[in-house]
Image (cartoon, helix red, strand yellow):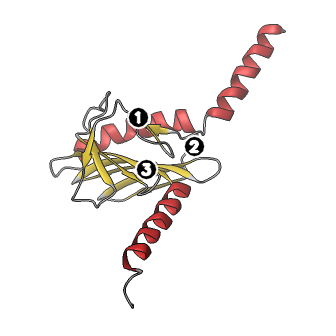
Amino acid sequence: MKSLLSVLLLTLSMQVSANTIEGAFGLKLGKVVPQKIRFDKYKDRGPYWFKFNPVKPLAGYDNYYFRLSPVKKKVVSIHAEGHTGGKQSNCEGSYNDLKTYFEYKYGENDREYISLSVYRVEFKSKSGIRRIVLECTSLKQDIEYFDYNEYIKAENEEKGILIRKHSDFDL
């Protein structure tokens, strides 16, 4: 009886935590970047985007970057990207492996889109605020971790910066 109760409690605790999306590659959504993570501006993406090298990189992914909120410097989104050499078949195995892993870790996917040129699956937290998007195309494979609340806060911070920057002008 005691072992049955232990198994039941373990199962329930796994179900409760199964849908918690925290972050990846040493970064946590909604938190500041840990000091151990070294990063540089990623000018190609914009002023609040940064490239970094994770402690544990994922095979097949060679470009890692994230977006910070401009004022509070909290992580809004985290990305891992790998090039597929012009062949979607180069990322199909990785896509399927990661999809299976995410289903195991976070539960059933929220939505999946498959066409001749794109494989895309999305996992959402129970609250719907956080999500993971996994994508495979002939150009690249991509994993995105995203926090919608932090995104809205970051957009409002950016608007505030722009308003203050232009407040002296008669516009």
Mark 2 surroundings: few (<14), some (14-19) or many (≥20) residues within 10 A: some
Residue 133 in sight: no
Name the one closer to the observer, 37 or 10: 37
Q: Is residue 53 above or below residue 165?
A: above
Coordinates of residue 125 in the picture (x, y in percent): 59, 47
The span from disc 1 to disc 2 (Cα, nearest Å) is: 30 Å
Q: Determine the secondary structure under disc 2.
A: loop
Coordinates of residue 134 in the picture (x, y in percent): 40, 48
- Mark sitting earlier along the chain (3/1): 1
- Mark sitting earlier along the chain (1/2): 1
Q: Which mark is residue 128?
A: none
Q: Which mark is residue 108?
A: 2
Q: What residue type is disc 1 on?
A: Pro
Name the one closer to the observer, 34 or 125: 34
Q: Which residue is mark 3?
A: 73
At x 22%, y 40%, the residue is: 62
The span from disc 2 to disc 3 (Cα, nearest Å) is: 32 Å
Q: Which residue is mark 1?
A: 34
Coordinates of residue 131 in the picture (x, y in percent): 51, 50
- Looking at the figure, which quarter contains the N terminus? top right
The span from disc 3 to disc 1 (Cα, nearest Å) is: 11 Å
Q: Is residue 29 above or below residue 150?
A: above
Q: Determine the secondary structure under disc 1.
A: loop
Q: Residue furthest right?
A: 1
Q: What residue type is disc 3 on?
A: Lys
Residue 61 occupies quadrant: top left
At x 80%, y 15%, the residue is: 5
Q: What residue type is disc 2 on?
A: Glu
Q: CB under 8 Å between callouts 1 and 2?
A: no
